Amino acid sequence: MATPGIIVTVCTANICRSPMAQALLQHALRAQPEPLKSFKVVSAGVAAREGDKVSENSVVAMKKVGIEIAGHTSRLLTRELIDQATAVLCMTESHRAMIQLTFDPAPRNVYLFREFMPRSADKEIGDPYGGPLIHYEACRDEMVEAIPSLIEFLKTQVAKQA
């Protein structure tokens, strides 16, 4: 069963989007009251190779907002991570589908990072891999925009577990 307090951010290779999402969400949660303040955010990829370095443009995009992620190395999403998680937050519907097809039984706690945004908002965060820095910055900004609605959702999850 899920251990309260662990959130997993997921993308494809765990070198661009999910490390940025991990750092941004962890930063935002530190400003929340307990128990959200003590949540641990980790990241993984559905097709990651263990130990790859985070993309340089992800590092630069995050430095521009005062967050350091240069030490991140990639890891593959595992059943253990899913089982520990209060929530698994994907970047795209294809990530969610891959998780639900790969793991049996399919986890129920899998959401999109932007799923809780207003109905008109785009729910997916595109992959900036190989693109110019501006694409990484736009990706980062889409995550930042989603964090308030995501924190509200996490508050409801905590209340359900209390």
Image (cartoon, helix red, strand yellow):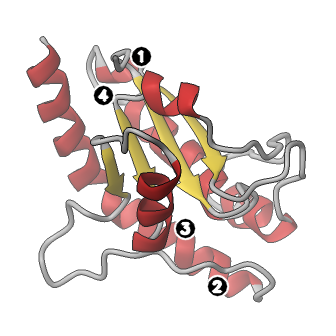
Q: Percent x, y for residue 144?
A: 42, 61
For badge 4, the amino acid type reads: Gln
Sequence-wise first label, 1 or 2: 1
Pointer 1 or 3: first along the chain: 1
Residue wearing tag 3: 140
Q: CA distance from mark 2 to mark 4?
A: 29 Å
**Residue 108 position within the rendered picture, expressed as x and y whole percent measured from the top left:** 27, 42
Of the numbered discs 4 and 3, the one sitting upstream in the chain is 4
Q: Which residue is mark 2?
A: 135
- Check disc 4 and report the residue beneath it: 32
In primary-sequence order, the first of circles 3 and 2 is 2
Residue type indicated by callout 2: His
Tell me the distance, in whole angstroms, between the alpha carbons under discs 4 and 3: 20 Å
Q: CA distance from mark 1 to mark 3?
A: 23 Å
Q: Does residue 21 appear anywhere in the picture?
A: no
Which quadrant, please, contains the N terminus?
top left
Give the foreground label among 1 and 4: 1
For residue 140, say whether it is visible.
yes
Which badge, 1 or 4, comes first in the chain's sequence? 4
Q: Is residue 137 or residue 89 the one in the foreground?
A: 89
List the residue tagged with mark 1. Answer: 38
Q: Residue at x 69, y 67 (%)?
A: 61
**Tags 1 and 2 in contact by the CB under 8 Å rule?**
no
Alpha-carbon span between mark 1 and mark 4: 9 Å
Residues tagged 3 and 2 counted as in contact (Cβ below 8 A): no
Residue appearing at x 82%, y 55% in the figure:
54
